Amino acid sequence: MQMGAVIELAVSQLCAHIGHEASQLTSIQVMQSKFLKSWRVDQGRVTLRTQQRAVLDALASVSEARGDHAYGVGKWTLKESVLHMIDTERVFAYRLLRVARADATPLPGFDQDRWVPTSDAALRTVASLAEEFSAVRAATLTLVDSLTPAAWTRTGTASEKPVSSRAIAWIIAGHTAHHMTLLREKYLG
């Protein structure tokens, strides 16, 4: 798969996940340029590690009361949003593993809107979510660190779309960046 096709696919998958058309997302186009056009595995590792620290720093400033805040009717609480980030990273890390290992089995999508209400996020503390995010990101980084150059070029199918290992790693970073922007603007701002 050519790099341009990988970029287009990663952007369209991230846009579909967050409910926007690629043509509407200038910030996604900026992220596309920053994260994938010049994506090298070492840069990806740095991005994922930097994000880990940024998420943990942001969550350290959140009170338990604030964790149960939703910025609007029908919107997720801060804790639900963080747990969604964790769940999604697990799903995408699993996809990364399967694609990197040349597993040609198509991987199904998942319904985030069904997962969040059954996540019991309200029963969790912000500190426990921060700890879980840290553990999940550490596992993702261990996987990323273990992949060979050949593994980064492999492609598979997820949510009925072709995707490369490299694109999945970018989607993990892009998804976290998207939700951190929402957390800063809607919950912490």
Image (cartoon, grey):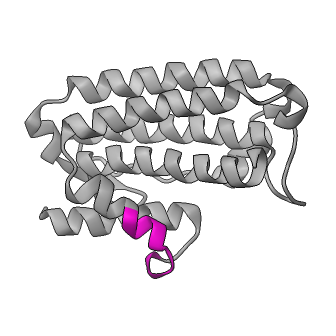
Which one is in front, 112 or 59?
A: 59
Looking at the picture, does residue 171 appear above or below residue 8? above
Q: Residue at x 30, y 47 (%)?
A: 105
> Horizontally, is 61 left or right of 154 in the view?
right
Percent of width and height locating residue 62: 77, 30
Percent of width and height locating residue 146: 22, 23
> Horizontally, is 34 left or right of 178 in the view?
left
| Residue stretch rendered in magenta on the structure | 22-30
Q: Residue at x 46, y 27 (%)?
A: 137
Q: Residue at x 24, y 47 (%)?
A: 166
The reply to whether the magenta stretch includes residue 104 is: no
The reply to whether the magenta stretch includes residue 26 is: yes
Looking at the picture, does residue 63 appear above or below residue 152? above
Looking at the picture, does residue 2 appear above or below residue 108? below
Task: Give the image quarter of residue 157.
Answer: bottom left
Q: Residue at x 19, y 29 (%)?
A: 147
Which one is in front, 23 or 6?
A: 23
Res. 97 visible in picture: no
Looking at the picture, does residue 64 appear above or below residue 27? above
Task: Give the image quarter of residue 79.
Answer: top right
Q: Main secondary structure of the magenta part?
A: helix
Which one is in front, 166 or 30?
A: 30
Res. 169 visible in picture: yes
